């Protein structure tokens, strides 16, 4: 017999996995944006320079869109790999616990 669901170690694992998932996606998107802002403020010559005839700052600004998509993809991938299986396990255990309590 396992511990009641409210005290189960799987809930702690689920919270940890979800927290890691949020941090990964947030740091990916915000980290790139902060890098862009820091370069804009402290390296204006780099940002106004050209790369392939296009201002580097514009290339980095447009690059924010794929980086945001990457953050969303990371969020979904970590959800599928780590969070969803744990949530499914806890959901199944909750159903079993509810049935056991109904029988009593």
Image (tube, rainbow, N blue to C red):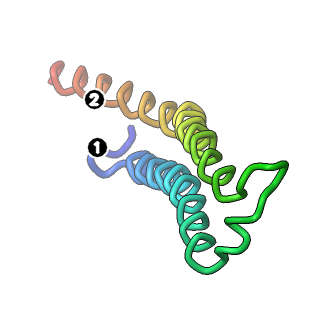
Q: Quadrant of the N terminus?
A: top left
**Residue 42 horizontal/vertical position (percent):** 61, 80
Labelled pair 1, 2 in contact (Cβ < 8 Å) = yes
Residue 77, quarter of the rendered image: top right
Residue at image x 15%, y 21%? 102
Across the whole image, how many numbered discs are drawn on residues?
2
What is the C-alpha distance between the residues marked 1 and 2? Answer: 8 Å
**Residue 82 in view in this figure:** no
Q: Which mark is residue 97?
A: 2
Q: Quadrant of the C terminus?
A: top left
**Residue 23 horizontal/vertical position (percent):** 50, 57
Q: In terms of depth relative to the viewer, which is nearer, 53 or 1? A: 53
**Residue 49 horizontal/vertical position (percent):** 75, 64
Q: Which mark is residue 4?
A: 1
Crowd band around label 1 with a 10 angstrom C-alpha radius: few (<14), some (14–19), many (20+): few
Residue 69, quarter of the rendered image: top right
SS for callout 2:
helix
SS for callout 1:
loop
In the picture, measured across the screen, residue 46 lies left or right of residue 8, that is: right
Residue 67, quarter of the rendered image: top right
Q: Is residue 53 above or below residue 72?
A: below
Residue at image x 24%, y 24%? 100
* Earlier sequence position, callout 1 versus callout 2: 1
Residue at image x 65%, y 59%? 57
């Amino acid at each position: 017999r396992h511990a009641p669901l409210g005290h189960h170690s799987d809930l702690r694992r689920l919270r940890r996995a979800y927290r890691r998932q949020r941090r990964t996606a947030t740091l990916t998107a915000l980290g790139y944006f902060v890098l862009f802002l820091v370069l804009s403020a402290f390296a204006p010559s780099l940002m106004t320079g050209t790369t392939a005839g296009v201002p580097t700052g514009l290339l980095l600004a447009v690059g924010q869109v794929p980086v945001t998509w990457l953050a969303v993809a990371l969020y979904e991938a970590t959800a599928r790999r780590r969070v969803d299986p744990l949530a499914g396990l806890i959901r199944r255990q909750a159903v079993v616990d509810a049935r056991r309590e109904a029988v009593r």
